[in-house]
Image (cartoon, helix red, strand yellow):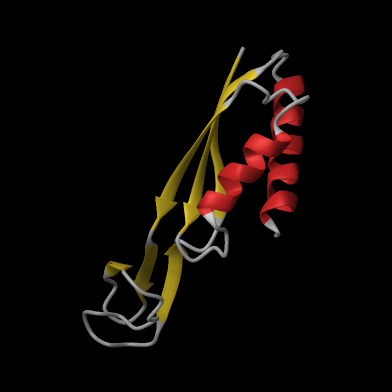
Amino acid sequence: MHEYSIVQALIDQCEELAVSNKASSITKVVVKIGKYSGVEPHLLQIAFETFKDQTVCKDAEFVMTIQPLVIICSDCQQENVLDQPHYICPVCESHNIRVTDGEDMVLMSLEME
C-alpha cells in the first residue's frame, strides 16, 4: 500500500514546515487529491490516522478535497472537466489536450499553533 509512504512523506513535510514557522503543533492538514492520482482517499485517511501519533500532526484534522480531471484542448482552447479518463476534448473531439489538474496530490494548507 503506497499510501503509507505518501503519508510518511506528507508528515515529514509538515514537520519541516512547522519547524520553519516556529510552530509547536499542526491542527489541520488540507490536501487536494486528483481523482486520477492513483491515491485511494480512504486508505490515505487510515494511513494518516495511523502515522500521525508521536508527530507534530498528532492532533491534526485531515481534510481531503477530491479534484476531478481537468483538461485544456490545444485546438479549441476550451477547458473541460472530465468524468472519466477519456483524454479527448468533449467539444471538438481532439486528442491534442493538456491535463491541468486531477492527476496529482498536493498539500494545500496547514493550520499551525
Q: How many numbered badges does the structure rendering display?
A: 0
Please state the horizontal and vertical placement of residue 61, each as a whole percent of the image.
Answer: 53, 27
Figure quadrant of residue 65: top left
Relative height, residue 73 to residue 80 (above, below):
below
| Quadrant for the N terminus in the image | bottom right
Taking the spot 74% from the left edge, 45% from the top edge, the residue there is 9
Please state the horizontal and vertical placement of residue 43, each as a whole percent of the image.
Answer: 59, 52
Taking the spot 37% from the left edge, 81% from the top edge, the residue there is 86
76 with respect to 65 (left or right): left
Please state the horizontal and vertical placement of residue 55, each as a whole percent of the image.
Answer: 76, 26
43 with respect to 8 (left or right): left
Taking the spot 38% from the left edge, 60% from the top edge, the residue there is 68
Q: Given the current orientation, which residue lies at the most extreme left position?
A: 91
85 with respect to 80 (left or right): right
Figure quadrant of residue 81: bottom left
Relative height, residue 59 to residue 43 (above, below):
above
Relative height, residue 56 to residue 74 (above, below):
above
Please state the horizontal and vertical placement of residue 101, each as a whole percent of the image.
Answer: 44, 60
Compare residues 57 and 100 and report the one nearer the observer: 57
| Quadrant for the C terminus in the image | top right
